[in-house]
Image (cartoon, grey):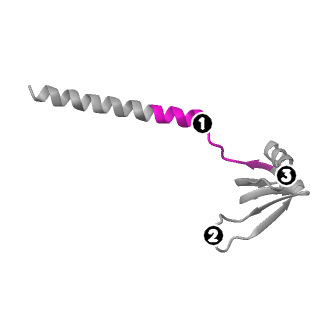
Amino acid sequence: MLVLAAAAGAGASESISQARVYLRTGATLDLHEVTVAGDSLVGMSGPASQADRRRVAVPTANVSSIAVREVDAGRTALAILAIAGASIVIIGAAACASLASSY
C-alpha cells in the first residue's frame, strides 16, 4: 500500500501512468492514469490511444495492493555498457581477423 499512500500524498493533480490493482476479492484491474480521489482509486480502463476506454473508480477499502513498473536506471546503464563492451570486442575481433587474413 506504499504506492497508494504515495499517490494520496501527491494529490489528484499527479497520477501513476499505469498500475495493476489487486482487489480484496482476488480480481485484478489494469488501470492507466491512476489517481486517488477522496476515498477511491480512480483510473482509466485503457491507454489514451484506446477509443473505448472508460473511467474506473474503486474504493480504497477494496484494494489489497498495487503493482507499478519502475525503470531501474542502474540496470539500464549496466545493460548499455554491456552492449557497448560486447560491440567493441566483436569489432576488435573482426579487425584482427581481417588483418590476419591479409598477410
Judged from the image, the secondary structure of the residue bearing numbered disc 2 is: loop
Look at the image and say whether residue 71 sits in the magenta stretch.
Answer: yes
For residue 11, the mark is 3
> Which residue type does callout 3 highlight?
Gly
How packed mark 1 is, by other alpha carbons closer than 10 Å (few <14, some 14-19, many 20 or more), is few
Q: Residues within 10 Å of mark 2 (few under 14, many from 20)?
A: few
Instruction: Kindly identify which residue carries mark 2.
Output: 50
Residue at left offset 65%, top offset 63%: 47
Specify whether residue 29 is in view.
Answer: no
Query: Is residue 95 visible in this depiction of the protein?
Result: yes
- Residue 21 lies, with reference to residue 91, above or below; the image says below
Q: Are marks 3 and 2 in contact (CB under 8 Å)?
A: no
Residue 64 vs residue 59, the one in the foreground: 59
The residue lying furthest to the bottom in this view is 52
- Could you tell whether 31 is left or right of 82 in the image? right
Which quadrant holds the N terminus? top right
Earlier residue among tags 3 and 2: 3
- The span from disc 3 to disc 2 (Cα, nearest Å) is 25 Å
Q: Are marks 3 and 1 in contact (CB under 8 Å)?
A: no
Label 3: state its secondary structure.
Answer: loop
The mark that comes first in sequence, 1 or 2, is 2
Q: Taking 39 as reference, is 87 above or below it?
A: above
Mark 3: give few (<14), some (14-19) or many (20+) Cα within 10 Å.
few
**Residue 73 horizontal/vertical position (percent):** 60, 36
Query: Percent x, y for residue 56?
Result: 78, 66
41 displayed left or right of 46: right
Q: Residue at x 23, y 32 (%)?
A: 94
The span picked out in magenta is 65-81
Q: Amino acid at mark 2?
A: Gln
Q: Which residue does the numbered mark 1 point to in the structure image?
A: 73
Point 21% across, 26% down: residue: 96
- What is the total number of numbered labels drawn onto the structure image? 3
